Image (cartoon, rainbow, N blue to C red):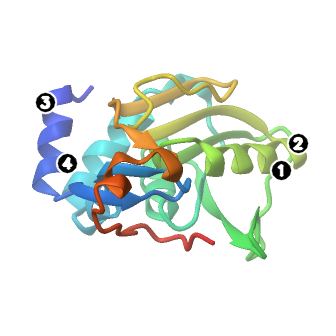
Amino acid sequence: MLSEDRVLAILKEAGVLLEGHFLLTSGRHSDRYLQCAKIFKNTRYSEELCSALAERFLDQKIDLVIGPALGAVQMAYEVSRSLHCENFFAEREDGKMTLRRGFAIEPGQRVLVVEDVVTTGGSVREVLELVKKAGGVAAGVGAIVDRTGGEIDFGVPFCAVISMKVRSWEASDCPLCKEGQGLSKPGSRKIS
């Protein structure tokens, strides 16, 4: 198991933690942003973090690892590699999370849902619903970073490589907006 110090060192080395005024995928604002996509440009980091996450689910007999596109595509692959099982991803079509490209969850399959960063868990919940509708068994949820500090509940076992409480606000309550600080949106999903 990786120590918290090692995880923080990886996040620092990879340039993952950014500071400023950010619009999150959830629509909330924050003074810190975790650009976990940078983890996956170096296989040394992704292998170390994803295998540490996979270790926490070794006893769950996982058949399939699935994550929401775009952030968890590479992550699902890397975690599944450590668990010696299949993987694929869900993606948005007309604003709704769906399975495409011939991907299908078989009834009874034990599925691990992964996400690079969990803030509100919205995308994870959408993928969990896909698993349930297909007759799969949601065996757990795994993340590299849990921004809630352990406060989120998916109704299934949840493990993160690191959990940290990162402040975020509704746009109407954002102190950075009130100070007139410029807002940036570094993530992959467009916000309407």
Q: Taking 192 as reference, is 80 left or right?
A: left
Q: Mark 3 points at which residue?
A: 5
3 or 2: mark nearer the eye:
3
1 or 2: mark nearer the eye:
2
**Alpha carbon of mark 1 to alpha carbon of mark 2: how far?**
7 Å
Residue 133 drawn above or below residue 183: above
Residue positioned 79% across, 53% down in the render: 105
Q: Taking 13 as reference, is 192 left or right?
A: right
Q: Quadrant of residue 111?
A: top right
Q: Is mark 2 on a helix, strand or loop?
A: loop
Which of the marked residues, 2 or 4, is nearer the chain's N terminus?
4
Q: In which quarter of the image is residue 6?
A: top left
Q: Is mark 3 on a helix, strand or loop?
A: helix
Which of the marked residues, 3 or 4, is nearer the chain's N terminus?
3
Residue positioned 13% across, 30% down in the render: 5
Residue 110: horizontal and vertical position, in percent? Answer: 71, 37
How packed mark 1 is, by other alpha carbons closer than 10 Å (few <14, some 14-19, many 20 or more), is some
Residue 119: horizontal and vertical position, in percent? Answer: 49, 42
How packed mark 3 is, by other alpha carbons closer than 10 Å (few <14, some 14-19, many 20 or more), is few
3 or 1: mark nearer the eye:
3
Q: Mark 1 points at which residue?
A: 106
Q: Name the residue under label 4.
A: 11
How packed mark 2 is, by other alpha carbons closer than 10 Å (few <14, some 14-19, many 20 or more), is some
Residue positioned 13% across, 49% down in the render: 12
Q: Mark 2 points at which residue?
A: 135
Identify the amino acid type marked 4.
Leu
Which part of the image, by quadrant, shows the N terminus? top left
Q: Are marks 3 and 4 in contact (CB under 8 Å)?
A: no
**Alpha carbon of mark 2 to alpha carbon of mark 4: how far?**
36 Å
